[in-house]
Image (cartoon, coloured by chain):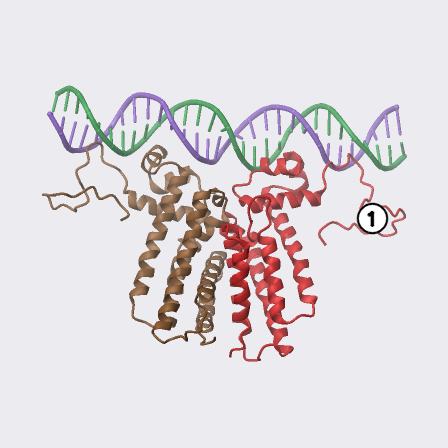
Chain colours: A brown, B red, C purple, D green
Amino acid sequence: MVQKKKKPVVVAKPEVATEPKRRGRPRAYEPDVAIGQALALFRKGGYAATSLDDLSEVTGMNRPSLYGAFGDKRALYIKSYQRYRDDYTVRVIAIFKADIDVRERLRRFFDAALDIYTTGDTAPRGCFAVMTVASDAIADPEIGAMMRENFVELDDAFGWCFKTAVARGELPETIDVPTLSQMASAILNMLSIRSRAGVPRVELEAFLQKAVGLLCRSSA
Amino acid sequence: MVQKKKKPVVVAKPEVATEPKRRGRPRAYEPDVAIGQALALFRKGGYAATSLDDLSEVTGMNRPSLYGAFGDKRALYIKSYQRYRDDYTVRVIAIFKADIDVRERLRRFFDAALDIYTTGDTAPRGCFAVMTVASDAIADPEIGAMMRENFVELDDAFGWCFKTAVARGELPETIDVPTLSQMASAILNMLSIRSRAGVPRVELEAFLQKAVGLLCRSSA
DNA sequence: GGGATTTAATGCGAAATGGTACAAAAAAAG
DNA sequence: CTTTTTTTGTACCATTTCGCATTAAATCCC
């Protein structure tokens, strides 16, 4: 899904299945890991503060190669975001598949977010989408639309949690699913901001423990 | 509080009380409005994406004057933040002084935030502190500390609201004040992110209406 | 009016930035 | 071995950026 596939029609040689015998000089880099390194750098400094030279250095690719492989800075930024989104999507799906009650599900959801937000060799990085919205990149209409979509998807994910909880009898039917979902999204935003600001993870976890309880209190 | 005062000891001349007879060539700019214009620009694009040339243009001051008056870009950024903080502080104080119940107080609080977040000649700007944390400026320890302090102050402000509500019998003594306060801060963060992302204000106001109800539901 | 003082305005310069042209290199195909 | 194809690596360009040095202007004090 992330990488090219190129119709492995009748691949006779059972190599690694990811090498369709390219023709020219072989690449000195792995596109996948390069995007990952670019993502890490963008998450550290944001769009404007990350230069192509920085990206070139961290990926080990020189600038023309970067350009040829991913396009200009903006394209690389968008590809990095898609990688970020793909990465956390698999975690969310795993949490959705688990047969657990709504409180545990929310706890795991927030905990996975903290994992992602506190990632960073030196300092926590927060949420890429939140960072993007806060940056100048939001002036780009296409990028803005992607970020709004991201937030809606998160609302929907939480909405699914709460609706499922009602269906399973864990919460009363009187709860306001949309409002609770947006509240959960708000908590996510707060985790992003504060973790990036340097608030210790344990503090945020302590808050989460009580916040989940508050969200799931059986109230009309 | 915002500007210099310079001991108006026995000011004989009742001018405007803000002109202590400077000596050299008079300024062609008003430091106050210049900072305001710089703030508007920083809020639009963030730290890295705002150049001194942009700031020079918007303030009408040429770069050497900017430098002489406020210091380098970082100093100007910090001064802009202080201006931002001073501006909203007066609004918060007004809300605190009003003799209203907790729901109305929270509503006004959030509404004032929306006023500030949706400010912008072309597009909404969000919260300056949130933007700063999300930017590369967070790498600066001093700026990071200022932002953490900002968040703590907001928590405290909400904490005062809830404690006062309990004292006035509007909420039961069993509420968890710190958790509710942080939840309110989380809502503030969400408003900042979404307004800047372009979510219409009416949508956010609709959410707020219900969110305040949820926060103030008399639950243990 | 003359000097002192403060600011404005011009412009320089070194470095960084995004982007690209072009030749050398490395592999497969013939 | 030669050609073709793809990527690498060096070098370059135009622009922007931050910062400062220097000169010109405007005002106050004597």
Which residue carries the number 1 mark? B17
Image spot of residue B46 (x, y percent): 54, 45
Give above or below for B103 relative to A8. Answer: below
Image spot of residue C11 (x, y percent): 62, 23
Image spot of residue B79 (x, y percent): 64, 48
Image spot of residue D24 (x, y percent): 73, 24
Q: For this view, does C6 lie left or right of residue A40?
A: right
- Give the residue drawn at x 59%, y 67%: B158
Q: Amino acid at mark 1?
A: Ala
Q: For this view, does A31 lie left or right of residue A213?
A: left
**Can see residue B76?**
no
- Give the residue drawn at x 33%, y 52%: A86
User: How many numbered marks, from 0 up?
Assistant: 1
Q: Chain of mark 1?
A: B
- Give the residue drawn at x 46%, y 48%: A132
Question: Where on the picture, by quarter, is residue A66?
Answer: top left
